[in-house]
Image: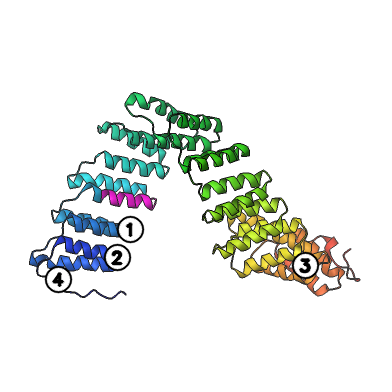
Amino acid sequence: MGSKILFTWPKQITNSLVEKLIQAEKDIHKAVHIFDLATAEYSNGFRHDHTTFGLMISKLVAVNQFRSAEGMLERMKQENCKVTEDIFLAICRGYGRVHSPLDAIRVFHKMEFFQLKPTQKSYLTIFDILVEENHVKRAIGFYREMREMGIPPSVVSLNILIKALCKNKETIDAALRIFHEMPNRGCQPDSYTYGTLINGFCRLGQIGQAKELFEEMVEKDFLPSVVTYTSLIHGMCQSNNMDEAIRLLEEMKRNGIEPNVFTYSSLMDGLCKSGHSSQAMELLEIMVLKHHSPNMVTYNTLINGLCKEGKLSEAVEILDRMRLQGLKPNAGLYGKIISGLCAARSYQEAANFIDEMVLAGISPNRATWSLHVKMHNMVVHGLCNNIDPSRAFQLYLSMRTRGISIEIGTFDCLIKCFCKRGDLHKAARILEEMALDGCIPDKGFWPSGKGKLR
């Protein structure tokens, strides 16, 4: 519980004073307390106005206290306080930020109950929220409603509409038609229009169309943004056109546009997929020199590429580097390194990484579960083959504890291994647990008097 704020109001309380006090307070509970203390001065002639109410609503929205923010709106209505469009839009944008577009629409429609007629600004705000949240059909319907209400088309509204239509391959041609019709509607396409279309075509794999638009954009003296360059570079990498991707990187640098972490990560992904992980590593060093911090995607890309090329020591170095940066490797990254070590028959080292993963409390999720089942079973197999049977047994026990499925081939391998070593106690235990798991051994599993399988 935060301590209550104790102070004495001056004889003349002004809205600007209350506004300054609330604005200065970072703790939302203390800010509400100041607001309430000012409300208690109503008997002395003070009244909150749209600035203090608006500020309080903004602060509540910033910490996702939407119910309280909407409650403030109702108080404003009860106190006959002027409610502005911007106050409503602050709440709508907040709902958009937390991915609740339907609540944003609900608040938008509340405006009429406050005798407010939404302007173009309000319609565009809601339209953009719907598109950002992939409510494409609803967004297009909202655009039609906006036009029916007499809101004229503008570069901004048509850009948002184009962004909506670029979301699906079925509607991207319609986006291109609107782009070509814009001048006839008195709206000249801008760099954002081109960038939106280029991104859409790249995302859908239509690189030729994206490249044409890019060239047209440059011819018209529009400077592509880092986002547009990155979209096209990513598209080139996906279509395995690495030479063009690198040429674009050099071009954007010449134009004074600094590549960002997504630009570098896209290029690294393309280089790794085309078997050039060494070049990807060079890009990593350039990226760090430019003070861009690699993210999980960057590290995942590099580790995956290095493991595919059998460069396991470099992959382990990247994993260490990642941890030094304060990023926690996930089960997928560990899985790639462990699988690579298994492919190189380095089962002891693979087992070390499994132990490290378990000690760090890292568990596979649904997406990586089957990989980890296969990987654990491979390591047990490898350790059984006269490398370290005791460790194979310990890993087997760990798998059972953590609910990782034991394959019938792994049971077979373990039983044969311990029978061969004359450790019939362990072999019998594994056989019993195999039966408990519902795996019925055939007669070939049963040990003979000499401690070997028939």
Is 287 in the magenta? no
| Residue 28 image label | 2
Whole-angstrom CA distance, mark 2 to mark 3, is: 62 Å
What colour scheme has been applied to the protein in the rendered image? Answer: rainbow
Residue projecting furthest to the right: 450
| Residue at image point 24% right, 51% down | 87
In front: mark 1 or mark 4?
Answer: 4
**Numbered marks: total:** 4
Mark toward the viewer: 2 or 3: 2
Residue 113 percent across, percent down from the top left: 19, 46
From the viewer's perspective, tell me whether residue 254 is left or right of residue 77: right
Q: Earlier in the sequence, mark 1 or mark 4?
A: 4
Looking at the rendering, the stretch of residues picked out in magenta corresponds to 88-99
Residue at 18% x, 69% y is 37
Inter-mark Cα distance, 1 to 3: 60 Å
Residue 349 on image: x %, y %: 73, 65
Reading the image, the residue beneath label 3 is: 431
The quarter of the rendered structure image containing the C terminus is: bottom right
Measuring 8% from the left and 67% from the top, which residue is drawn there? 44
Residue 128 rendering spot, x and y as whole percentages: 36, 42
Q: Which residue is mark 4?
A: 9
Q: Amino acid at mark 3?
A: Leu
**Residue 162 sits above or below residue 396 on the image:** above
Is residue 319 something one can see in this rendering?
A: yes
Q: Earlier in the sequence, mark 2 or mark 1?
A: 2
Residue 50 sits in quarter:
bottom left
How many other residues sit within 10 Å of disc 4, few (<14), some (14-19) or many (≥20)?
Answer: few
Task: Using the image, tell me which numbered label, if any, was put on residue 62.
Answer: 1
